[in-house]
């Protein structure tokens, strides 16, 4: 299994059907991606995921998380999958082939999360606010939705089919690591706090306003060094503003 495969985690958000969980796990095992994470899964569905023939060890090692933020905390890139033709988007939407190329490059050096929403509702706006960008499978207009297990399989095939080529063409040399989701969320939280303290955001600002700020920070695609620098600047600004108030 290529080393890059171990850096991809597949995240299923609120899955409800045991057959879909099993099919997703089997597709992961087929293509050598073994890190399965589930956010708030329907308990009965997770216990009864019986269709993962040959993927029992993968299901046994799958991890559950109460929130999406915790599930992607160690990832420097978070990509959501959706059709999105019926939704207003605030993120870049990449076709599967182009998105897979970008993910393969990032996997050479750091952890990436690939998100799949629930069978009934897909990814919520709050879920999407944790993403850097979105990716879609090019289905036909008349029948755009796909079964969860099929969608996982198609995305992982696209990621796996050129891994060796991508690895051989990667340039050598030390690169500054990208900020992971925890570092990025710290910057987000500090920026929201600064905006509230300054009066730009009200104390009871809407969830939508906070999601906009989170999306903005993720579009910056900060390195770990940049995140630390931004955090230091924001903390100093907050200290100054609060000191003046007192």
Image (cartoon, helix red, strand yellow):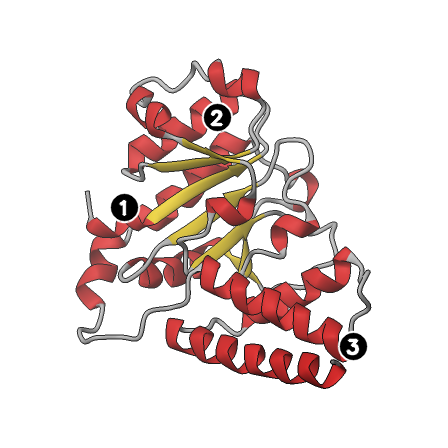
- Camera-near label (3 vs 1) is 3
Asked which secondary structure carries label 2, the reply is helix
Query: What residue is at 47 percent from the left and 44 percent from the top?
Result: 71
Visible in this render: residue 89?
A: yes
Based on the displayed image, in which of its 4 quarters is residue 118 positioned? Answer: top right
Give the spatial CA distance, label 2 vs label 3.
43 Å
Residue closest to the far front:
246
In the figure, 118 relative to 92: above or below?
above
Residue neighbourhood size for the residue with mark 1, other residues' Cα within 10 Å, grouped as few (<14), some (14–19), many (≥20): some
Q: Position of residue 243 (x, y in %)?
A: 67, 82
Give the spatial CA distance, label 3 vs label 1.
42 Å
Residue hosting label 3: 200
Q: Earlier in the sequence, mark 3 or mark 1?
A: 1
Residue hosting label 1: 6
Q: What label sits on residue 21 in the rendered view?
A: 2
Give the spatial CA distance, label 2 vs label 1.
20 Å
């Amino acid at each position: 299994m290529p080393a890059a495969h171990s850096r991809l985690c597949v995240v299923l958000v609120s899955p409800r059907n045991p057959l879909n969980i099993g099919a997703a796990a089997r597709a992961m095992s087929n293509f050598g991606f073994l890190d399965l994470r589930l956010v708030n899964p329907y308990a009965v569905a997770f216990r009864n995921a019986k269709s993962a023939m040959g993927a029992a060890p993968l299901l046994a090692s799958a991890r559950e998380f109460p929130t999406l933020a915790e599930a992607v905390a160690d990832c420097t890139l978070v990509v959501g999958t959706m059709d999105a033709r019926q939704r207003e988007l605030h993120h870049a939407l990449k076709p599967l082939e182009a998105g897979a190329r970008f993910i393969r490059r990032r996997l050479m050096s750091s952890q990436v999360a690939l998100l799949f929403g629930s069978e009934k509702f897909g990814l919520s706006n709050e879920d999407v606010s944790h993403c850097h960008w979105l990716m879609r499978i090019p289905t036909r207009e008349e029948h755009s939705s796909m079964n969860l297990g099929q969608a996982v399989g198609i995305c992982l095939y696209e990621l796996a089919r050129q891994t060796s080529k991508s690895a051989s063409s990667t340039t050598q040399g030390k690169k500054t690591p990208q900020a992971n989701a925890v570092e990025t969320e710290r910057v987000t939280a500090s920026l929201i706090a600064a905006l509230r303290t300054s009066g730009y955001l009200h104390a009871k600002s809407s969830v939508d306003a906070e999601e906009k700020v989170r999306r903005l920070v993720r579009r910056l695609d900060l390195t770990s060094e940049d995140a630390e620098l931004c955090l230091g600047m924001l903390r100093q600004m907050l200290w100054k503003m609060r000191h003046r108030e007192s």
